[in-house]
């Protein structure tokens, strides 16, 4: 499909016409500051407080928990580095991936990316629906019923899917204002939660085990933060002018992601000593609501809704680009309709029929992540590579790594045959897949180059 690119091809409140085609340099615009706010708002979610509580649940001391936080969130640099090819080529992440996976091989990976994105998009809709339902209760005093839940879901879906429908410029514009306004409210709410921290207990908590505590906690942080975004990185950099230094792109995406995530997880670590059940509570939004003073309750729920939908919009937009990269021949804007059918269908089932299905659904997404981690290894080694050195090397390395990752991963719906010991309570299997793929692909490429050089001589 030929697309005529003009300076207003990417303007706020207009439907973005570009799909996975390269963005011409003549219409490039924006700065790393825009990128910073995209990722800041995209990670402004109170659900990260629960992850902080999960860190504490491994029995770690405060200093061990801070180490886990620092090491785990440093993985967001991967998002920064994977965004560089977007600026260099004008392509979104999953379209650029075809350079090393080949067109046919990349379609499989793009489908995996789409399932991951539409899956988390659905989780966002479900959590946002519960939060909107809670807001109705606070404002109007109504009790939760199927009708109110459907209305809440409709509001969440309208906000999430309509913004993704409009596309890049609208998303970028709104993410900046969400960061300004709701970043401020997030800070106020976190300060309102701090009186519940048992500072003496937190400060003097004895250290926990390193191998079975610190290491798996780090893997969990990486899995729920950076790994969930890896196939979207270049989607938000491909409009940037070529004159923007690559290091500024890496810094903007990395710090834009780390700052809100670190702050929210830190508060979760501090609160977990006073509320051990926070790590496993079914409805963390409602749980935290009971700890807040009356003046903060409505701002907290509204901020929760806006923050989580801001992340869901990124999922919905990038899922459409992944669907196009998988070979679906429709306009980018119409991919949102495909997402709506899937995400609304699953959301309605969970909200109205089987709320317990959410655990199984999240377990399914954990298996999808086992397929993404090996892909990251190949993508990182191809950041500045325009052509594919070996499609066969990429595909086979990915298959081997993904097989090992699944075999060493334990989820609510599947436990791999090698998911024993330290692997059973962590996301360490993802990193087995990542490292094995990295090693196979790296040595395959370098041995091939050495053979070609010897043959030429």
Image (cartoon, rainbow, N blue to C red):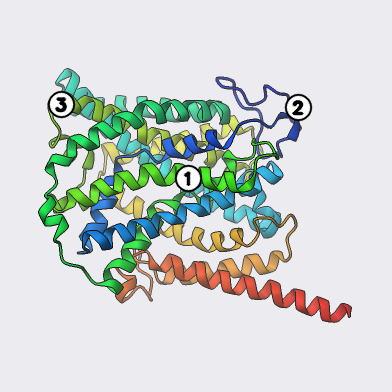
Give the residue at x 60% y 40%: 237
Which element type, helix, strand or loop, lies under badge 2? loop
In this rendering, the answer to whether 51 lies above or below 333 is below
Q: Which residue is mark 3?
A: 143
In this rendering, the answer to whether 240 lies above or below 102 is above
Residue 241: image quadrant is: top right
Image location of residue 147, percent across then percent down: 25, 25
Q: Is residue 412 visible?
A: no
For the residues marked 3 and 2, what is the alpha-carbon distance in whole angstroms?
51 Å
Give the label on residue 117, or none: 1
Give the residue at x 66% y 43%: 87
Image location of residue 223, percent across then percent down: 40, 57
Give the side of residue 450 with respect to residue 403, left or right.
right
Image location of residue 12, percent across then percent down: 56, 22
Query: Sequence-wise, which precedes: disc 2 or disc 1?
Result: 2
Q: Are marks 2 and 1 in contact (CB under 8 Å)?
A: no
Q: Which residue is mark 2?
A: 4
Give the side of residue 121 with respect to residue 280, left or right.
right
- Is the residue marked by circle 2 packed among few (<14), some (14-19), or many (20+) residues within 10 Å? few
- Pick whichever, 262 or 426, lies toward us: 262
- Looking at the rendered image, the quarter that the N terminus falls into is top right
Query: Sequence-wise, which precedes: disc 3 or disc 2?
Result: 2
For the residues marked 2 and 1, what is the alpha-carbon distance in whole angstroms?
28 Å
Which element type, helix, strand or loop, lies under badge 1? helix
Query: Sequence-wise, which precedes: disc 3 or disc 1?
Result: 1
């Amino acid at each position: 499909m030929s697309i005529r690119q003009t300076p207003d091809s990417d303007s706020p409140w207009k439907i973005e016409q570009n799909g996975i085609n390269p963005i011409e340099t003549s219409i490039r615009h924006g700065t790393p500051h825009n990128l910073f706010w995209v990722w800041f708002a995209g990670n402004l979610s109170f659900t990260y407080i629960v992850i902080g509580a999960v860190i504490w649940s491994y029995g770690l001391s405060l200093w061990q928990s801070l180490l886990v936080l620092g090491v785990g969130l440093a993985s967001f640099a991967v998002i920064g580095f994977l965004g560089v090819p977007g600026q260099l080529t004008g392509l979104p992440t999953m379209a650029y991936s075809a350079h090393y996976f080949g067109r046919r091989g990349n379609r499989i990976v793009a489908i995996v990316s789409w399932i991951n994105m539409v899956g988390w998009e659905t989780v966002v809709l479900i959590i946002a629906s519960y939060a909107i339902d809670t807001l109705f209760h606070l404002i109007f005093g109504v009790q939760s019923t199927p009708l109110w839940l459907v209305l809440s879901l409709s509001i969440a879906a309208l906000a999430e899917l309509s913004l993704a429908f409009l596309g890049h410029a609208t998303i970028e514009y709104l993410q900046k204002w969400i960061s300004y306004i709701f970043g401020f409210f997030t800070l106020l709410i976190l300060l309102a939660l701090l009186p519940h921290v048992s500072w003496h207990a937190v400060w003097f908590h004895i250290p926990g085990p390193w191998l079975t505590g610190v290491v798996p906690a780090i893997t969990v942080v990486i899995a729920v933060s950076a790994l969930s975004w890896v196939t979207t990185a270049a989607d938000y950099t491909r409009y940037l002018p070529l004159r923007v230094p690559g290091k500024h792109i890496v810094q903007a995406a990395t710090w834009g992601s780390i700052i809100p995530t670190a702050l929210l997880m830190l508060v979760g670590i501090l609160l977990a000593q006073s509320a051990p059940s926070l790590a496993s509570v079914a409805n963390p939004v409602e749980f935290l609501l009971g700890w807040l003073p009356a003046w903060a309750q409505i701002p907290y729920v509204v901020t929760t809704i806006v923050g989580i939908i801001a992340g869901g919009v990124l999922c919905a937009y990038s899922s459409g680009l992944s669907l196009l990269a998988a070979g679906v021949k429709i306009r980018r804007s119409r991919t949102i309709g495909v997402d709506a059918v899937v995400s609304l269908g699953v959301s309605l089932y969970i909200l109205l029929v089987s709320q317990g299905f959410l655990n199984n659904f999240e377990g399914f997404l954990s298996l999808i992540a086992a397929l993404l981690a090996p892909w990251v290894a190949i993508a990182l080694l191809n950041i500045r590579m325009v052509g594919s050195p070996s499609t066969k090397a990429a595909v086979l390395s990915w298959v081997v790594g993904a097989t090992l990752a699944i075999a060493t991963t334990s989820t609510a719906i599947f436990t791999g045959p090698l998911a024993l010991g330290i692997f059973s309570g962590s996301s360490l299997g993802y990193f087995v897949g990542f490292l094995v793929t990295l090693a196979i692909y790296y040595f395959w490429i370098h041995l091939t180059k050495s053979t070609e050089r010897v043959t030429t001589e």
